Amino acid sequence: MDDLRYKIIKQIYDEVLKANLHQSEIASHLLIPIAFLTAAATFSFNFLFQEEISVIFKGINLIPLLFLGYIISTSAGILLFLKVIGPSFYTKDWPQHEERPTSIFFFKLIGKIETVEDWMNFFIKNPHNQNNEYIKTEDLIEKAIHDLTLESYQLSKKAIKKVKLNSLANIFFCTSVCLFLLMISLGIIGYFYI
């Protein structure tokens, strides 16, 4: 019965992990077209600036203002994407245990264990004895089920946060594209009406 429970929770964990990684992949894949668009925007602005093309509205040249808006909006989106791609050690509300490791899967929590002997003591009753007496398989499976259940929850919180950050970053990038297109459109109009 424990084997079946373990397989089910492991499948849940794997699916939540995939959702989490998928959000990171979305962010990393979108950075490439953003780099291309930024190069195009920079080239276009440089061309318009060198050709002294301007569109004046109420005494303000709109071309540099639109380019500045593009840079600010794109930078904000990139910072959000970097937050999505970067490491996230969400451990809020993670229950602590005195006599056993907090998690047997999460490397950050494993790394908080003082010594390798402390880590080994969870799995082997007396690591210095030649006749090692390992933790019972049932107990290990119970701990694994507990930790995977907890980590599935923690990963789902991370994935939800990543979805929100990706959505907000997309708003910034849509704004960037609109500012770029407006800058180009006004630049073309200014070029033909100089």
Image (cartoon, rainbow, N blue to C red):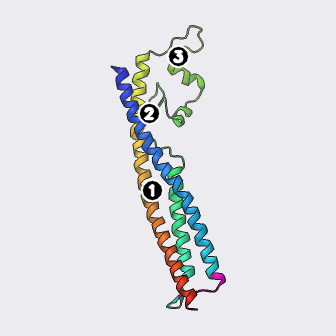
**Residue located at (52% from left, 83% from top):** 186
Dot placed on the residue nearer the N-terminal end, 2 or 1: 2
In the image, is residue 185 above or below residue 33? below
Tell me how far mark 3 sits from mark 1, CA to CA.
44 Å
Residue annotated with mark 3: 124
**Tag 2 residue:** 96
Q: Secondary structure at mark 2?
A: loop
Residue 60 falls inside the magenta stretch: no
Q: Residue at x 56, y 75 (%)?
A: 68
Magenta stretch, residue numbers = 49-55
Which numbered circle lies on residue 166? 1
- CA gap between label 2 and label 1 equals 32 Å
Labels 2, 3: front one? 3
Frontmost of labels 3 and 1 is 1
The residue at the point 38 percent across, 39 percent down is: 153
What secondary structure characterizes most of the magenta part? loop
Rendered view: 68 above or below 37: below
Crowdedness near tag 1: few (<14), some (14–19) or many (≥20) residues, C-alpha within 10 Å? many
* Front disc: 2 or 1: 1
| Label 2 vs 3, first from the N-terminus | 2
Q: Position of residue 142 (x, y in %)?
A: 39, 23
- The three-letter code of the residue at mark 3 reads Ile
Classed neighbour count for the residue bearing mark 3: other residues with Cα under 10 Å, few (<14), some (14–19), many (≥20): some
* Amino acid at circle 2: Gln
Helix, strand or loop at label 1? It is helix
Q: Which mark is residue 49?
A: none
- Taking the image as shown, residue 128 lies to the left or right of residue 139, namely right
